[in-house]
Image: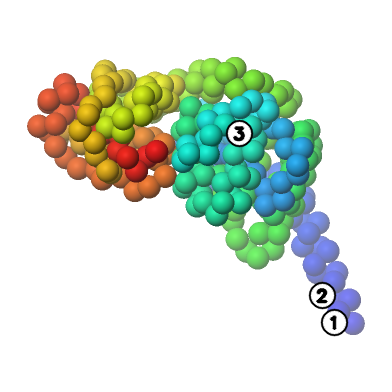
Amino acid sequence: MKKIILGLSIVLMVVLLVALTPLFLTKFGSKLLSGTDELYILTSEEIPENTSTLYIAYTGSNQLQPQLFAIDGSEQVKVSGGYGQYKLASVVPLLQMEGKSEQETAAALARALGLPVSRIITLKEQIPQPATKSELVSVLYKSLFKQLTHFAIPREELLFLEAVRQAPILEVLPLNESQKAISRLLDLTAQVQQFSLCSVAIVNTTGEPGQARQLANMLERRGGRVVRITDTQVQSEQTILHYHAEASSCQSIISVVKTWFSKPLEISENSLETEKYRSQLVIFIGMDSI
């Protein structure tokens, strides 16, 4: 009898989770999930060989609803760290197989996409390729239920689920069109005005051409104001950020810069360097970034 009661309790709990999760998102999700203003990537521990689509969620903010983007993953992109060219959809499985950390994988994806990737959500469940909206919802629900039964609140999955629920249809777009669409969306965020108050100079010390321009492109897509990019023969082993003593507005853009790099950055106040480059923030791209 006890086993029957326990079994019925589990079934009832699952039914309640299925019924109440949409209500939770509707009633309480706006408070729990607002104000993050980030980009999340969805992936799985079980990645099929025919992986063809990359799913990115803009997590929403106090001003904007979450949105979902499905990107054609068949396009070739350069993977940092000396890996060369790979299909976009293959970047995450490649780096997971290599044992790279989430920060290293997110930084490599940020460079491949030209966008600031904040988090990578890795599900235990396999994601169909390509997935319909209902299939993505189903996979995310399964992940949520497993974690909720252990009394965990999987905030990242909730954020992604809300973006999927808000999506009218899942239209797979080429990378360049997705970059433009996400840039237009990010231009509407409240952070853009604050980002624009911080003038940024980028100095490439690696000897590898294009490093400063790539970072500048990402920051400009995010609403940053890059006033100078340059190369120097004086190499720096570590990437260094110097900000002006009176430039409090630069702290927000620094958090975006961090998404571009796989290792901790040396960050310090140095008004002499910022004045030298006529900016409020100077980024010296070091050898540790390539």
Q: Is residue 99 above or below residue 6?
A: above
Check the picture and name the quadrant holding the N terminus. bottom right
Query: Disc 2 to disc 3, how far (Cα)?
Result: 50 Å
Which sits in the foreground, 266 or 225?
Answer: 266
Amino acid marked by disc 1? Lys
What percent of the width, then of the height, locates residue 184? Answer: 51, 18
Check the picture and name the quadrant holding the C terminus. top left
Q: For the residue carrying disc 3, how many other residues have a C-alpha within 10 Å: few (<14), some (14-19), or many (20+)?
A: some
Question: What residue is at 53 percent from the left and 39 percent from the top?
Answer: 83
Q: Which residue is mark 3?
A: 86
Query: Disc 1 to disc 2, how far (Cα)?
Result: 6 Å
Q: Which residue is mark 1?
A: 2
Amino acid marked by disc 3? Tyr
Q: For the residue carrying disc 2, how many other residues have a C-alpha within 10 Å: few (<14), some (14-19), or many (20+)?
A: few
Q: Do tag 1 and tag 2 residues touch (Cβ < 8 Å)? A: yes
Q: Do tag 3 and tag 1 residues touch (Cβ < 8 Å)? A: no
- Name which of mark 3 and mark 1 comes first in the sequence: 1
Query: Disc 3 to disc 1, how far (Cα)?
Result: 55 Å
Question: What residue is at 46 percent from the left and 41 percent from the top?
Answer: 81
Question: What residue is at 17 percent from the left and 23 percent from the top?
Answer: 277
Report if residue 248 is visible in the image: no
Q: Which residue is mark 2?
A: 6
Q: For the residue carrying disc 1, how many other residues have a C-alpha within 10 Å: few (<14), some (14-19), or many (20+)?
A: few
Question: What residue is at 75 percent from the left and 48 percent from the top?
Answer: 126
Query: Circle 3 sits in a helix, a strand or a loop, which is it?
Result: strand
Give left or right: position of 287 versus 99: left
Which sits in the foreground, 272 or 35?
Answer: 272
